Amino acid sequence: MELYIDTANVDEIREIAQWGVLSGVTTNPTLVAREGRDFLEVIKEICEIVDGPVSAEVLSEDMEGMVKEGREKKNWHENVIIKLPCTAEGIGACAVLEGEGIPCNVTLVFSAGQGFLAASAGATFVSPFVGRLDDAGSNGMQVVEDLAEMFEIHGFRTRIIAASIRTPNHLTEAALAGAHIATVPYSVIKKSILHPLTDKGLESFKKDWEAAQN
Ligand code: E4P
């Protein structure tokens, strides 16, 4: 499973990219708006930091507008992936853009049926939202597991991005459920590296080493 970071904050991306663990970046309108910067400028800067797929979401709600935006955003950088909502208009736009060789990430997926339709439209990526489903009392990871099994049985090439990841446990569960990618917020990536026994072990190694030097 590959790791993407789910943020539009370039400082966060730069820091985690230095660990050598990042394969891509996802953004959404909320994350970009939070930065208070120009959309194009942020995406171009992100593409300079991470050499991998960078999802940029369309803002149009109709198919024609989404296709137009998708074509424009693809010109921003070769690594840009067009993020489309899992609506009838979004699925239609996905089929058109993928038909032109423009890779799409169908987002806001909350059921295996929605994921199936995205894959049928030729989506390169599909993003089931685990945390938001958990918040609503469902089992978000089950959708990831179902999609992984469905894509395997039927030979769909669509890659599953486990999204709306809230905890380090979500990260490992996504890998075990068969997600190809997990897109994870900065705070969860930072938490995932921590374990109190690592700190304790390091401290005792240091103490033992220093004691032996005297
Ligand atoms: C994914 O591409 C989305 O940007 C993201 O994972 C949404 O996460 P949230 O539910 O924490 O907003």
Image (cartoon, rainbow, N blue to C red):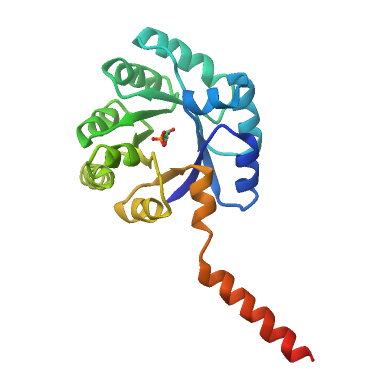
Instruction: Please state which of residues 145 and 37 is positioned toward the viewer in this rendering.
Output: 37
Q: Quadrant of ligand 1?
A: top left
**Residue at figure coordinates x 30%, y 31% from the top left:** 109
Instruction: Please state which of residues 19 and 63 is positioned toward the viewer in this rendering.
Output: 19
Q: Is residue 147 left or right of residue 163?
A: left
Q: Is residue 141 visible?
A: yes
**Residue at figure coordinates x 51%, y 54% from the top left:** 191
Quarter of the image for residue 115 reads top left
Residue 66, compared with residue 194, is above or below; it is above
Instruction: Please state which of residues 78 and 145 is positioned toward the viewer in this rendering.
Output: 145
Residue 77: image location, x then y, percent? 59, 25
Residue 174: image location, x then y, percent? 35, 50
Q: Is residue 81 visible?
A: no
Quarter of the image for residue 130 reads top left
Q: Quadrant of the C terminus?
A: bottom right
**Residue at figure coordinates x 48%, y 15% from the top left:** 71
